[in-house]
Image: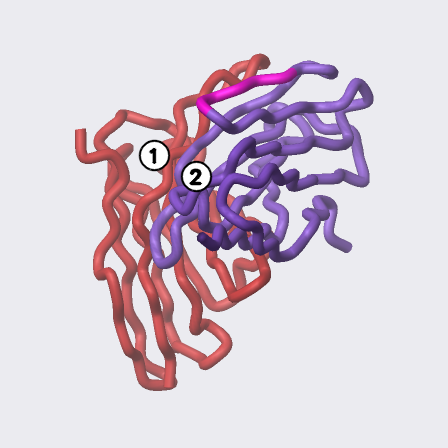
Amino acid sequence: NAGVTQTPKFRILKIGQSMTLQCTQDMNHNYMYWYRQDPGMGLKLIYYSVGAGITDKGEVPNGYNVSRSTTEDFPLRLELAAPSQTSVYFCASSSMRGPFLQETQYFGPGTRLLVL
Amino acid sequence: SQELEQSPQSLIVQEGKNLTINCTSSKTLYGLYWYKQKYGEGLIFLMMLQKGGEEKSHEKITAKLDEKKQQSSLHITASQPSHAGIYLCGAYYSGNTPLVFGKGTRLSVIA
């Protein structure tokens, strides 16, 4: 299993440009997540999905959009890039959680985005 | 306000020394995870704690969750350069809410 894969690894955008960060998992996980990590700030949840066709906002959703048409893929879209979106973006997935939280989240290697 | 507070923010220890990282919640936790992040890489799962008073160990790393389920500690014995990185705690506050992360503790181990 490849686990969670993200592309690209690094990208430079100009203000106002748009792009899609790709995330794919091959573990048949229902739950998928997008986080951003700013220096010294830990991880903040942008969007998450509990299954194909279902998405929900996290803590910092403004400026982003997501879709979940398949179990495997969970792309994150930036429509009008702004300098405040310079960050490292992590995608994660987990299996459906029952009451005993046996499953952890598996993280991709991250996408480093610079908006100039 | 930040629900999960990690301390210290950064830590420099000499190789072979013991160290402790703390994660404190303002509310009772449903479950607590510890992750390690090497610089410029993704997060690696270390341990998960759910029961009050629970303690788990893996190699030289021990994690504990207090009885009230509001504080967890991560203890590393005889630190090595391979232990260097950023340690993050993440918490669930119910079975249906997403994971909330602390800001992380940056650990450096010097020879």
The residue range painted magenta reads B55-59
Where residue B85 appears, as percent x and y from the top left, is 45, 50
Name the chain under label 1: A
- At label 2, counting other C-alpha atoms closer than 10 Å, the crowd grade (few under 14, some 14-19, many 20 or more) is many
Residue A9, image quadrant: bottom left
Which dot marks residue A49? 2
From the viewer's perspective, is B28 left or right of B87? right
According to the picture, the residue beneath numbered tag 1 turns out to be A52
Q: Nearer the viewer, mark 1 or mark 2?
A: 2
Q: CA distance from mark 1 to mark 2?
A: 7 Å
Query: Are the residues flagged by discs 1 and 2 in contact, CB closer than 8 Å?
Result: yes
Q: Which chain is purple?
A: B
SS at mark 1 in the image: loop
Residue drawn at the location 56% of the way across and 37% of the way down: B98
Q: Are marks 1 and 2 on the same chain?
A: yes
> Residue A8 magenta-drawn?
no
- At label 1, counting other C-alpha atoms closer than 10 Å, the crowd grade (few under 14, some 14-19, many 20 or more) is some
Where residue A115 appears, as percent x and y from the top left, is 38, 80
